[in-house]
């Protein structure tokens, strides 16, 4: 129970950080969050629970340790935006916990865009998306050594279509575990 | 009247040919100019020893037609088919309204090469304007034709022709699937003779030419990271010149070929850099937390123009490389990106208006912004070296195609592809070896 309460506390503080970060994206340096110290110290008790389900399935994909279900690894973004959607924070928090428990694992965060706009500008926008996820994970205590980011801009669409639905599927960040 | 007599050799523009599968279809001309100049390109008399070759007058005539400045006269309407100056009767051409007539004959030389002799006449003034013998290998037949088209264009318009140039572009096949392939292709300016310079299962993007047209630079994800590669077109030698952490993008050679502007995010966010290509030293040009990207050089090589979202939305800026003074250049609309400066100092770039992305031209003296295209999802305008036209990428029925528009917006044609999505065209510098530098 303590862990769940802690999780929602972390989610809330990170939510406010993510929203603040997006509002001020190109004015001043990103505010460095003060909260991460707390979850970092609080993580070890969580790893001490021996009855936990494995963090990965037999194909090495991350699973939700509470339910055993495959964890979402793709996170979608609004048009021309790079802020994480609030609904994704809980799943990203589980990713952070898994990476914290498994220091030998690392993750590549790919940033992608839809086809609208120029290609190199989209490459930069894709990097902002992967950076947003990276910042969330590092503020949740994940070591930056476990994270790599790469932007593909609009070059690798998930959906080759040219309508709103395809564009939404293509504006994404994808976590790839290694 | 003075006539120019030249005997010239077509230097080999040989390449590490990988494949000859054409990646561009036939050009579709969609919009022309009013009152184009009537020109008669008479079919060439061919030495029987040459065997079968494409009709030279078709290649020359089509070059001239797609410029929008010329209307070639139909062969079936011609009253005579001269190939020598003494066979030209001006009366035959005045009747048809032809202002210029081009005659030619090709013969096989002992060394197997082709010698094409041409004569260009001004019909109203009944004078010869230009003549030469052009020599080239059999596989350079189209080069000979484009050269002749350049001669006609320059003699009539006073502007150097750009038919002998090449177009580099990206061909993406099966994008959005696990079988996706990406290649750098190079074709003649009329879309013919396309061939593959480099193929990868990972994306390639942002192609640009060196000013001597011997190399192209591009971004390749072949290592699963964006890296900048310089690729020698003739030898096929590839050199990875930038592979820092983060983005390595937007490579573009300086007009003197000594430096390359590029975008690196190794310090946290995308910034413009200039690399000295001799010693690979880097000079950082921009310094802020916004996106700074898509640099290109002003024609004098003293300034860079680039895209930045430092004012929240992407706009075009200019930086003086001597003083580092920066200045915003675009103010109309909330999305202006990937600009190129024309030789006259005016700009072309991608402009979003009512959610539609098209190529726009901006008059720098009066600030006027004029859309050149009416299509959507337009990208990557690249100006021909003579400044007459630009090529860009757009979509047609969900497929990436290339489009060409004259700088005044009056002439338009398309280069579709049935092989896949074609995009990011880069018009080469002048490369006709007959005219030198």
Image (cartoon, coloured by chain):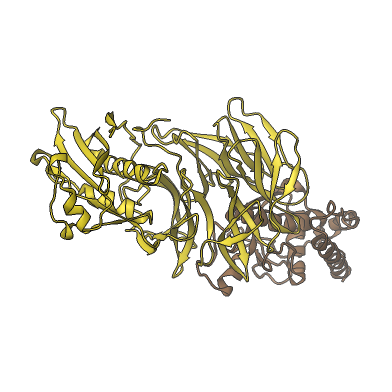
Chain colours: A brown, B yellow
Q: Nearer the viewer, residue B169 or B53?
A: B53
Q: How many marks?
A: 0
In the image: residue B53, left or right of residue B151? left
Q: Nearer the viewer, residue A151 or A41?
A: A151
In the image: residue B376, left or right of residue A109? left
Question: Where residue B240 appears, x then y in whole percent?
Answer: 54, 35
Q: Answer above or below: position of A104 versus B113.
A: below
Residue at the left extreme, as displayed: B48
In the image: residue A51, left or right of residue B383? right
Q: Is residue A171 visible?
A: yes
Q: Answer above or below: position of B318 versus B178.
A: above
Q: Is residue A176 visible?
A: no
Q: Answer above or below: position of B46 versus B259.
A: below
Q: Nearer the viewer, residue B393 or B301?
A: B301
The quarter of the rendered structure image containing the C terminus of chain B is top left
Question: Where residue B216 appears, x then y in whole percent?
Answer: 48, 39
The quarter of the rendered structure image containing the N terminus of chain B is top left
Q: Nearer the viewer, residue A86 or B220?
A: B220
Q: Which quadrant would residue B273 be assigned to in this image?
A: top right
Question: Where residue B42 appears, x then y in whole percent?
Answer: 19, 49
| Residue drawn at 46 percent across, 40 percent down | B429
| Residue drawn at 19 percent across, 42 percent down | B104
| Residue drawn at 79 percent across, 58 percent down | A25
Residue at the front extreme, as displayed: B125
Question: Where residue B432 appears, x then y in whole percent?
Answer: 37, 36
């Amino acid at each position: 129970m303590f862990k769940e309460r802690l999780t929602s506390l972390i989610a809330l503080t990170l939510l406010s950080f993510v929203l603040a970060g997006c509002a001020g994206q190109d004015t001043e340096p990103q505010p460095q969050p003060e909260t991460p110290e707390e979850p970092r110290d609080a993580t070890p008790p969580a790893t001490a629970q021996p009855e936990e389900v494995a963090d990965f399935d037999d194909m090495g994909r991350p699973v939700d340790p509470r339910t055993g279900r495959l964890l979402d690894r793709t996170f979608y973004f609004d048009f021309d935006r790079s802020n994480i959607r609030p609904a994704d924070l809980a799943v990203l928090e589980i990713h952070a916990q898994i990476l914290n428990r498994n220091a030998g694992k690392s993750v590549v965060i790919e940033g992608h865009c839809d086809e609208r706009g120029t290609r190199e500008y989209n490459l930069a926008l894709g990097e902002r998306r992967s950076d947003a996820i990276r910042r969330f994970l590092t503020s949740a205590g994940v070591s930056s050594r476990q994270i790599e980011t790469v932007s593909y801009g609009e070059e690798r669409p998930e959906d080759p279509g040219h309508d709103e639905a395809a564009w939404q599927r293509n504006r994404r960040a994808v976590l790839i575990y290694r | 009247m003075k006539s120019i007599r030249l005997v010239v050799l077509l230097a080999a523009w040989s390449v590490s040919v990988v494949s000859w599968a054409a990646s561009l279809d036939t050009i579709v001309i969609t919009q022309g100019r009013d009152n184009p100049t009537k020109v008669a390109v008479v079919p060439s008399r061919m030495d029987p020893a040459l065997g079968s070759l494409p009709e030279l007058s078709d290649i020359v005539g089509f070059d001239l037609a797609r410029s929008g400045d010329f209307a070639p006269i139909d062969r079936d309407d011609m009253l005579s088919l001269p190939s020598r100056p003494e066979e030209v009767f001006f009366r035959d051409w005045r009747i048809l309204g032809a202002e210029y007539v081009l005659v030619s004959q090709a013969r096989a030389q002992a060394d197997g090469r082709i010698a094409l002799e041409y004569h260009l006449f001004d019909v109203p003034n009944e004078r010869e304007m230009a003549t030469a013998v052009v020599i080239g290998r059999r596989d350079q037949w189209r080069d000979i034709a484009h050269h002749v088209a350049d001669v006609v264009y320059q003699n009539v318009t006073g502007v150097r022709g750009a038919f002998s140039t090449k177009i580099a572009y990206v061909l993406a096949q099966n994008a959005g699937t696990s079988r996706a392939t990406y290649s750098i292709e190079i074709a003649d300016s009329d879309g013919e003779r396309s061939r593959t310079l480099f193929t990868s299962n990972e994306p390639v993007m942002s192609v640009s030419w060196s000013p001597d047209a011997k190399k192209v630079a591009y971004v390749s994800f072949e290592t699963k990271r964006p890296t900048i590669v310089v690729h020698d077109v003739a030898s096929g030698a590839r050199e990875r010149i930038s592979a820092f952490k983060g983005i390595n993008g937007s490579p573009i050679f300086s007009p003197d070929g000594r430096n390359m502007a590029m975008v690196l995010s190794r310090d946290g966010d995308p910034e413009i850099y200039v690399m000295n290509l001799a010693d690979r030293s880097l000079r950082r040009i921009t310094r802020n937390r916004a996106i700074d990207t898509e640099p290109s050089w002003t024609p004098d090589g003293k300034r860079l123009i680039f895209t930045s979202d430092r004012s929240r939305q992407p706009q075009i800026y200019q930086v003086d490389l001597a003083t580092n003074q920066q200045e915003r250049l675009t103010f109309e609309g909330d999305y202006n990106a990937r600009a190129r400066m024309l030789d006259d100092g005016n700009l072309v770039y991608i402009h979003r208006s009512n959610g539609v992305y098209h190529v726009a031209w901006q008059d720098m003296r009066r600030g006027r912004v004029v859309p050149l295209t009416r299509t959507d999802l337009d990208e990557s305008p690249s100006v021909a070296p003579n400044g007459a036209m630009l090529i860009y990428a757009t979509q047609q029925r969900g497929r990436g195609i290339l489009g060409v528009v004259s700088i005044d917006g009056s002439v338009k044609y398309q280069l579709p592809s049935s092989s896949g999505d074609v995009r990011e065209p880069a018009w080469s510098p002048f490369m006709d070896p007959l005219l030198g530098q």
